[in-house]
Image (spheres, rainbow, N blue to C red):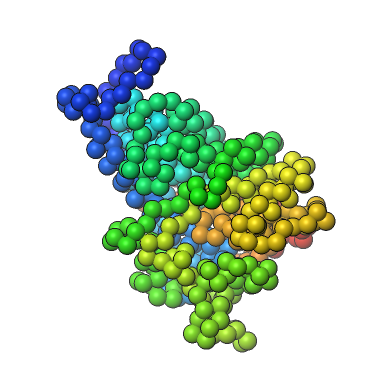
Amino acid sequence: MRIRNIALLAAVSLTATACIDLEGDKLSTSPNLPTTATLNQTFIAVQGIGFATITSDLPMFTNVVMQQLTGNGRQWVGYDQYNQPEDFFPVGGFYTAGGLIDIRKGQDLARVANRKSYLGILQVWEVLTMAPAADIYGDIGYSEALGDKPAKLDPQQAVYASLQILLDDAITNLAACGVGPGTADLVYGGNVAKWTALARSLKARMYLHTAERIPGAYALALVQAKLGISAAANDYASYQSSTLGEQNRWYEFKVGRSDDVAAGRTLVELMRSRNDPRLARWFEPNGVGAIVGQYPYTLPRPGEEGDPSWLTDAIAGLAASMPILTWAETRLIEAEAAYRTGDEAGARAALNVARAAVPLPAVGAGVTGAALLTAIMEEKYVTTFRTLEAWNDYKRTCYPNITPTAGKTNVLARLPYGSAERSTNPNVPALGAQPLRNWNDPITTTSTNGAACRGQK
């Protein structure tokens, strides 16, 4: 986490209230101003590396913890038992090439060129990058992350608060003028309305992540979710292609690691019990034509039909996009936030909109109270597969009420910083001194249906 300082670009003084377009000749005639290509190339690098960071090993690992997947070979059997090495995913990966360093570089370039909407997009990307770091590790270097000395660890709650302020600033900048990234934006093509809605959905997601600690967070999440991503066509998902280096990372994992990871029993059997049509869309039949999910830390048990399944090309093929934040997640945030603030009718309506898109039948008016909350979290557990959110939700709600892996009392709640951070930054505590849970994850004693939580004690 000891990251070198980035030299700030010279500020451009703009006294007029109207925006000044610094595109084209205004840029190319001054050696002190960046070219459009430099900003675009920086943003493309941020996206390419960022997609790899936030859609590859981290969600796969948390999906294993949440029994949506299972470790089936080599070190993934150990991960299935929460025996991840200290350096499984060092926190420094969120800062180095393509991470916060390059994001801030791009922001500086956008400021110099007075391209405010472009700046707003890069600010949203900063949150997409740093919020998962705070989710996973808790206290992280942020306010001093790019200084010339070892960064202090900011409290997780302070990081979340700073990221919420940054999103507010991003929304303001997205509403301003300035030439956007155009085709250098690999997902939204520079569409500021889509980026603004994504910023709102991000705010809603982060409010949920603090709801056990901050009174009123559910109400704030509800407001933002209603302003968030408004259609599945506007989902924010990774850009992938068949070109080497742009391929789906889970596809590359399958090609290189064979059967090290497979379908998880909890997710597969839940989907089967609900007649969820996504089961056949997501999971391949095995050698005997059955879709099989494996229990954690075991080989197939007697009565199971052969080897466990892997994912179809539809969601983990060569050029398949990976979900980052979607319309469906936004609707389910709305559903839970409505329920938590006393609006069961609104909660049921938002849940049923998400179910109809699957398609699944509507939840009836007779489903109320704990049963309605459980139905919302069940839908979200399935819908957010391939992201970190099932893990984040579990820590807050104990849904699903899974049994910890063999020999463990608690379901894994955070990852360690890593030895590289400890060796270069004296502010990072020794492995044994690091907390088992983060500030936003106090122990949840009961699951959504009122049963004792088996994995948080």
Measured from the top left, where is residue 381 in percent x and y? Answer: 61, 59
Residue placed farthest to the right in the image?
366
Query: Looking at the image, which residue is at 61% across and 60% down?
Result: 358
435 or 145, which is in the foreground? 145
Q: Is residue 406 visible?
A: no
Residue placed farthest to the top in the image?
15
Image: 173 above or below 283: above
Query: Looking at the image, which residue is at 73% across and 53% down?
Result: 373
Question: Which quadrant of the view contains residue 210?
Answer: top right
Question: Which quadrant of the view contains residue 303?
Answer: bottom right
Q: Is residue 178 visible?
A: yes
Taking 280 as reference, is 453 left or right?
right
Image: 146 above or below 380: above
Q: Quadrant of the C terminus?
A: bottom right
Query: Looking at the image, which residue is at 68% across and 68% down?
Result: 274
Image: 37 above or below 93: above
How many numbered marks have been drawn onto this rendered protein structure?
A: 0
Query: Looking at the image, which residue is at 71% across and 49% down?
Result: 349
124 or 83, which is in the foreground? 124
Measured from the top left, where is residue 440 in percent x and y? Answer: 61, 45
Q: Quadrant of the N terminus?
A: top left
Measured from the top left, where is residue 254 in percent x and y? Answer: 40, 71
Measured from the top left, where is residue 174 in percent x and y? Answer: 45, 31
42 or 69, which is in the foreground? 42
Question: Which quadrant of the view contains residue 405?
Answer: bottom right
